[in-house]
Image (cartoon, rainbow, N blue to C red):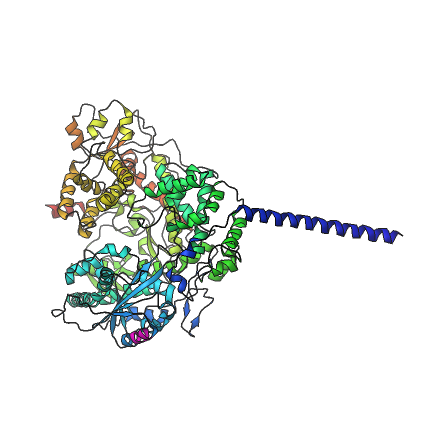
Amino acid sequence: MADKKEKLKILLTIASVAAISIFITARLVRRRRRFNQRRPQIPCYLHSEIKPPLSFKRVLADNSYSPFSHFNSQPDSVNEKSPNLTHPYEAEIASLMESPLLQFSKIPMDGFDVKMDDSYVWVESQSQLSQLAQVLSEQSAFAVDTEQHSLRSFLGFTALIQISTEKEDYLVDTIALHDSMGILRHVFADPNICKVFHGADGDIVWLQRDFHIYVVNLFDTAKACEVLSKPQKSLAYLLETYCGVAKNKLLQREDWRQRPLSDEMVQYARTDAHYLLYIANCLFAELKQHDCEYSSFTDDKFNFVLEASRRSNLICLQLYAKEIDGFPGQSAAFSILSRQLNGQGAAPMPGETKFQDLVRRLCAWRDLMARVHDESTRYILSDYAIVALSEKVPTTQADIYGTIIQADLNIDSSNLSSSVPSPSPLVCSHWIDVHQLIQDKLGNLEKFFPVVIQNCLGPNGSCPLSVFNYALLMNSSLKLDTKSVSKQNGFKNPRQVSKKASRQLFIQKFSCKSPVYHNCRIYANDGRLLCYCDGRKLEWYLRRDLAKLVDDDPPAIILLFEPKGRPEDEDNDFYIQSKKNICVGCGEGNHYLRYRVIPSCYRIHFPEHLKSHRSHDIVLLCVDCHEVAHAAAEKYKRRIAREFRIPLYVRKVVDSNQAPIISGSSELTDFKDSGVSPLQLRTAAKALLRHGPEMPPSRHDELTQIVMRYYGGREISKEDLERALVVGMSPHERRRLEKKNVYHSTKVDTLKEASETKDDIERSITDNPSTCSDSGVTTACNDMDLHSSQISETKSVCEVDTDYSESSTPNEIADSSCTRYEGNTSVRHNKKLSLLGHGPHGKQVVDHILNECGEEGIGQFCQRWRQVFVEAVNPRFLPGGWDVMHSGRREFGEFSVYNPAKKGTDGS
C-alpha cells in the first residue's frame, strides 16, 4: 500500500512539472505571436532595388564577424586557419627588397605623346580577361589603378581596375568579372614583372579582400617622390609636372558601379594609369642619377633605387584584416562619445548616462543593419543623426524622421554625398526598431538582436538573403565568440586581431633599418677610453684631421688633442660601455625604435650643455614596450600640467588687433567669450577656404562664427581666412605648408605675407579657470623627491610678462607678443614654437624650473622622468652605467660645434 502511495506521489509530481512547462511554453509562444502581430511587416527596400554586388556568386570577405581567410600559395587553396597571418608571398617580396627588379620599358622621354587617344579595351568577359592575363605575362612592367565603391557596401568593393601597358589601356569591369578575377592572380604575383602603382596602400589590401590577388614587385611612384624629396607626392602633381595634364579629383567620388561609364569617368579612369609608366621611367631615371652623383661616397652610401624599391615592396607585405569589435558598433560609439566630450570641453562623467547608453544602442543596431543589408554605416544613419536622436529622444515616427533630417542638414557636404537620402530607405523600412531602441523597450541587446536577424533573414524574414549576410543567419547570436577568435589569431584581446597585420607593417616602416649602436671607440691622446659611439662621429673627427684611425674592426680612433672632459669627471661609466642593439625592456632584437625618456617638448628648451650629445636618455624599445612607455609619459605630462598649472595645449588665441580692446574692457566675459582654439581655428578656416560655397548655410555660419571669434567678432574676408590658416604654426610648419601647397586656391605669396604679419599677431591664450596668485609663486622644485609617488597639488606656476603693465598703450600691447593666462596675466611667447602641440607648455615648465631652481632643478626634473620610464617599462636590459640619478652636464671642448665661443665666432 505504501508503495502505491509513493508511486502516486511521483506521478503527480511529474504531471505537475509537465503542466507547468506546457503553461510556460504556451505563454512564451503567445507573447512571441503578440510581438509579431504588433510589429507590422514593412517590405524591405532591397526588394525594389537591385544592387550590383548581389549578383556575386562568391565573396571572400562577407559581412559576418569571422576573420578573413588569406590565400595559401602552397598548395593552391584557401588557408582556412592562418594563426600567424603569414603573407603567401613573403619570401619573394623579401628577396625583392634586397635585389629589386625594376625592368621598365624604354619609353623615349622626348617622344612620349602626352595626348591620350580614344582607343582603349573594355574587358567584361572571361575570355577577354584570359587574353589580358596572357598579354600582361609578356610585359616587363605595367601600370595599375583601382576605383572603389564604399557608400552602398559594408566592406566596400573594387568596381573597376585600370591597367596600362606601353601600347594599350585596359578597363576591367570587376563587377561583371568578380568571380573570375583569380585569372590575374599569377600575373600580379610574378616577381619578374614590375607593377607600377601610385599610393598603393589601399589598392594592395583591396585586391586581397576582393580577389585574393597579391602584388609582388611593386614600384610606387609616391614612394619614389618621398625618396627624391619632391615638394609633393600626389598623382595630380606628377601629372602636371611630367605630362602637363590636369586631373579632376571630383570624379573620384562618382558612383563607379554605374554601367555604362560616362565619357568623363572613362577619361578620368584611363588618366590614372595611362601616364604612370612614363612617370615611373622619369622618376627611375632621377633615382639612378642621384645614385651616380653620390657614388663617390663609398662609406655609408644611400642607394636611392634600392630605397625606393624597399619602401614600395614594404606596402606589398600588408595583409587585409577585418576590424572586429568586442561588440557591434563599439568603436563607432567610442568615437562619437569621445568627440562629444572633447567638443564640450568636459571631463568624462562617472557611470553610465542615458545619452551614452542610447548612443551605444544605436551604433550597435546600425552596425548590424549595415551587415545585413550590405550598406555602409554612414548611408544608414550618420553620426550626427545618432547624437541628435540620443539627445532629443523622439517618440513618434515623424519626430524620428524630422530629427534625422535636421541633423543631416548640418553635415559638411564634403563629408557626405548629397545623393544620400535622409532618412535612408533602411531607416524607413525598419523605423520600428529605431523607435523601440530609443524608448528602451528592448531590454538586453544580446537577446534582442538574434530576434531582429530572424525577422530580417529568417524563413519569414523581410529582407533578402545574399552571400554577404548568409553567415550572419547561420550564427545569429551576436554575443561574439571572442575566445575562439582570439585563440585562432593568437591574441588575448579580440580587437587586436585586426591590428596584427598593421603592427607588422608599422614595424617594417618605422623600426630602425640598421644597427643604432656601432660600438666604435674613441680614445684620448693618453690612450684612455673616452666613449663608444657610431661611425659618423668617427668620420667627423677624421675628416677634420683631429684624430687618427688605430683599429678597423670595430673601428677606433685616438684624438690628436686634449679633450675637455673624461668619463670619470661625471662619475659615470655609461659612456665607456658597449651597447647592444636590443629593446632595453624585453630584450627583443628583431626590431626596435628610438625612445626619448625625457619628452622632446621639455628637453628642447634645456640649456645646450644639458642636452647636446647626451645619449643616456635615448634608449631602444620594441613596438610593444614603446607603446607602454609612451602611454605612461602622456599620463605623466598631464600630471606635470596639474602640478605647475600650465595647460598642455593652448586653449584660445585672439587677433592682436582685438587684444587691446578685449583687455581694456571692464567686463571679464568679453575676454572669455572671445578667442578660439588654434587647432579649431585652423580647421574652420581650411574648411571654409576649400568647401565654403558648397556647404549648407547652417554649417557655413557655424564655421564662420569660429573664425570671427578669433577676430573679435568682426566680419571676415578671404584674406582673414588665409591668415587664420597659419595662426599658431611654427616657422617650420609654415614652410612645410608652403612647400606642399595644401590648398591650390591660395598662392604661396599669401602664405609668405601671412608669415611676415605673424610678428604683428598677439596670441591671447586662456586655459581652464584657476587662480594664479599675484602675491608670489610657489616653488615647484624644492621638494622634488624622486622616491615619493606623491606630488603636491598646492604647487602652481604663473610667468608674468614684466614688459606689460596697466600703463602700456594699445600699440605696445599689440607689439609685444605675449601669452595671456586667467584673463589678465600675460607671459611672453616664443614665436618659433608651434601653438598646435605641447611646445608652449614645455617652454613654460622649463623656464619656471630654471628661474626657481636653476640647473639643479632641471637635473631633478630629468630624474623624475627616468623614474617614470623605469616604473612603466621595468627595463631588464639597460646598458651598464645607466642610472636614474645620472648627471647630464657636460663641458664643450675647443673644437665642439656647441662651444659658445665657437658659436659666437661663427655668427660674427
Residue appearing at x 23%, y 55% in the figure: 249
Q: Quadrant of residue 286?
A: bottom left
Residue 529 is one of the magenta-drawn residues: no
Is residue 581 positioned above or below 653 on the image? below
Which residue occupies the foreground of this view, 271 or 807?
271
Is residue 460 positioned above or below 820 on the image? below
Please tell me whether the stretch drawn in magenta is mainly helix, strand or loop.
helix
Q: What residue range appears in magenta?
A: 127-133
Q: Is residue 592 visible?
A: yes
Residue appearing at x 52%, y 58% in the figure: 475
Which residue occupies the foreground of this view, 727 or 504?
727
Residue 130 is one of the magenta-drawn residues: yes
Is residue 343 positioned above or below 198 on the image? above
**Farthest left residue?**
908
Q: Position of residue 744 (x, y in %)?
A: 18, 50
Q: From the viewer's perspective, is 580 left or right of 552?
A: right
Q: Position of residue 344 (x, y in %)?
A: 36, 37
Q: Is residue 607 visible?
A: no
Q: From the viewer's perspective, is 755 left or right of 316?
A: left
Q: Position of residue 333 (x, y in %)?
A: 42, 46
Which residue occupies the foreground of this view, 393 or 311?
393
Task: State which quarter of the image contains the C terminus.
Answer: top left
Q: Position of residue 847 (x, y in %)?
A: 27, 37
The number of numbered badges drawn on the structure is 0
